Image (cartoon, grey):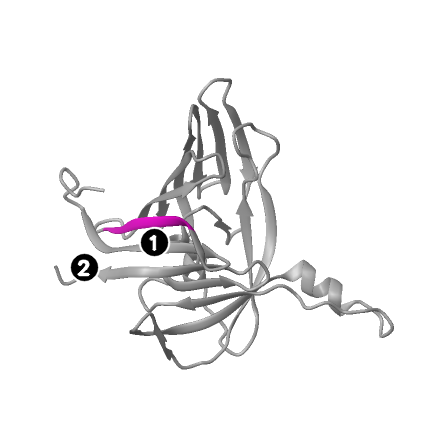
Amino acid sequence: MDEVGKPNLSRIYRGAYDYTRNDSTFSEETYEVYKHNREYTHNFISQTLSRVPTGELLKITVDYTFSKDWLPLTISIIKSLGNQSVEEKFSFNNKNNLLTYEFIPKDGKPTVEEIPMPPKFHIATPCTAASMAFLKSKKFDQTSDNQYVIYSSNNMWKYKETLVSKNIGVRRISVTSDTIKYQGKELQGFQYEMYDVEDKEREMKKKKHEVKEKVPMLSVFLSKHLTIPYIVEDTATKTEVSVRYLNDLNDD
């Protein structure tokens, strides 16, 4: 994460998150964000460390580059746990709308796929800092629900299946920004809710006599900095990702 030898890159943000479940911290993420001064692309680089039940340390490094239109260009996800390690690579060709996905295990044959992509899409990664960047890929309707196509990989240490996609609904709770107090600090940002569109449609199709269940929601409090989240909360699992610090380096 060093700018030495990268004259066209400017480091513009750095920060860290704590991951908690039932008030117990189980993981932490540190990240830095760079802007390419000529191509107007943005690069998110993060490292997440988690202690698994066996006592071993799971390390995940994400290198995520977005185009000037905020579509994924290249992604590298490197996971290591004990003697196990694997890399997943994504490369998008905007000329033919094909995504090349590579699954590269430490020991074994790599798997390579080419997957057609829609005009607008996002790829989910274990990098919370970049998790909401898809909001910048198209104009957001503040008065209605907005839908996005999100792709993700369920492959861990062995290749099992191709990427899966979901339609995600996002809505902003209020048009104006909110200020919340968190750990003694005042944070100014925007409150959003996210849900699985298929889950919502399934509940809406139920008949009157059928029991309707509450659609699971993610609550996201976004900063004004490139949609970098301050807080992501999943009330169903009592899991929260919360900002430890977020430094704006644009004036450095």
User: How far apart, in angstroms, are the residues tagged by discs 1 and 2?
Assistant: 20 Å
- Label located before the other in sequence (1 or 2): 1
- Location of the C terminus (image quadrant): bottom left
Q: What kind of residue is marked 1?
A: Lys
Horizontal side, residue 231 vs residue 117: left or right: left
- Residue 249's tag is 2
> Foreground: 159 or 184?
184
Q: Nearer the viewer, mark 1 or mark 2?
A: 2
Image height of 107 relative to 7, above or below? above
Residue ID at (35%, 55%): 17
Locate the N terminus by quadrant. top left
Residue most extreme to the right: 209
- Left or right: 51 as drawn, with respect to 199: left
In the foreground, 172 or 141: 172
Viewer-side residue, 19 vs 6? 19
Q: Position of residue 89 (x, y in %)?
A: 43, 34
Q: Nearer the viewer, residue 104 or 113?
A: 104
Q: Is residue 42 visible?
A: no
- Going by the numbered disc 2, the residue's amino acid type is Leu
Residue 189 at x, y percent in the picture: 36, 73
Residue range of the region highlighted in magenta in the rendering: 26-35
Residue to which mark 1 is pinned: 68
Q: Secondary structure at mark 2?
A: loop
Query: Which residue lies at the image location 84% right of the left edge and 69% below the top edge?
Result: 210
What secondary structure prevails in the magenta region? strand
- Give yes or no for contact between labels 1 and 2 (Cβ–Cβ under 8 Å): no
The numbered dot on residue 242 is: none
Judge whether 5 appears above or below 137 on screen: above
Q: Residues within 10 Å of mark 1 (few under 14, many from 20)?
A: some
Decide whether residue 75 is among the magenta residues. Answer: no
Quarter where residue 175 is shown: bottom left
**Vertical arrangement, residue 25 with respect to residue 116, above or below:** below
